[in-house]
Image: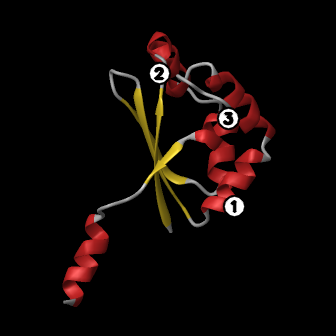
Amino acid sequence: MTRVCFRMQVAPEHMERYRERHAAVWPAMLRAIASAGRRNYSLFLDDDGLLIGYYETDSVEAADAALAASEVAAAWEEEMLRLFDGASGRADQTARILPEVFNLEDQLVDADRR
C-alpha cells in the first residue's frame, strides 16, 4: 500500500465553487476513483486556497492510468481545471506530490523491532 499526498492551489475567486463541487461529487466520479484503486481519499482546503489531498492505493501507476482512461474523470477534471491557479492540464495529472517524511505506524513498527 502506498500513501500519496499532493498539493494544489485553488484560485481565490473560485474557493466557494470548489467547495460546492466537492460537497456533492458526481456519483460516477466517486465510483471511478474507487474502481481506480484509490482508498481513504481526502481533500483539505485552507482559507488561502492551499489544497492538500491524501489517498492510499496499491499501485499509483495503475490508479493514475485508470483515471487517465476514464471519460467521467476527464469531464470532471475539465470542469475543475478553471478553478486552480496556474493550472496547465488535468489537475489529477499535474498535482505536486509531497514526499512523506513521517508515519507514526511505520515508526512504531521500527521502534518495536529495536
The CA span between labels 3 and 2 is 18 Å
User: Disc 2 designates what residue?
Assistant: 19
- As helix, strand or loop, the secondary structure at mark 3 comes to loop
Quadrant location of residue 71? top right
Q: Residue furthest top?
A: 13
Instruction: Note whether 82 is above or below 57 in the view shown.
Output: above
Circle 3/circle 1 CB separation < 8 Å = no
Q: How many marks?
A: 3
Q: Which of the two labelled residues, at mark 3 and mark 2, occupies the earlier sequence position?
A: 2
- Of tags 2 and 1, the one toward the viewer is 1
Circle 3/circle 2 CB separation < 8 Å = no
Q: Position of residue 114 (x, y in %)?
A: 19, 89
Q: Residue furthest bottom?
A: 114
Instruction: Note whether 13 is above or below 96 in the view shown.
Output: above
Few, some or many C-alpha atoms within 10 Å of disc 2 (few <14, some 14-19, many ≥20)? Answer: few
Q: Residue at x 46, y 14 (%)?
A: 16
Few, some or many C-alpha atoms within 10 Å of disc 1 (few <14, some 14-19, many ≥20)? Answer: some
User: Disc 1 designates what residue?
Assistant: 62
Q: Which of the two labelled residues, at mark 2 and mark 1, occupies the earlier sequence position?
A: 2
Q: Which dot marks residue 90?
A: 3
Image-based side of 111 in relation to 3, left or right: left
The CA span between labels 2 and 1 is 28 Å
Q: Check disc 2 and give the amino acid type.
A: Arg
Few, some or many C-alpha atoms within 10 Å of disc 3 (few <14, some 14-19, many ≥20)? Answer: some
Decide which of 74, 33 is in the foreground and name it. 74
Q: Check disc 1 and give the amino acid type.
A: Ala
Q: Check disc 3 and give the amino acid type.
A: Arg
- Of tags 3 and 1, the one toward the viewer is 3
Q: Position of residue 103 (x, y in %)?
A: 30, 64
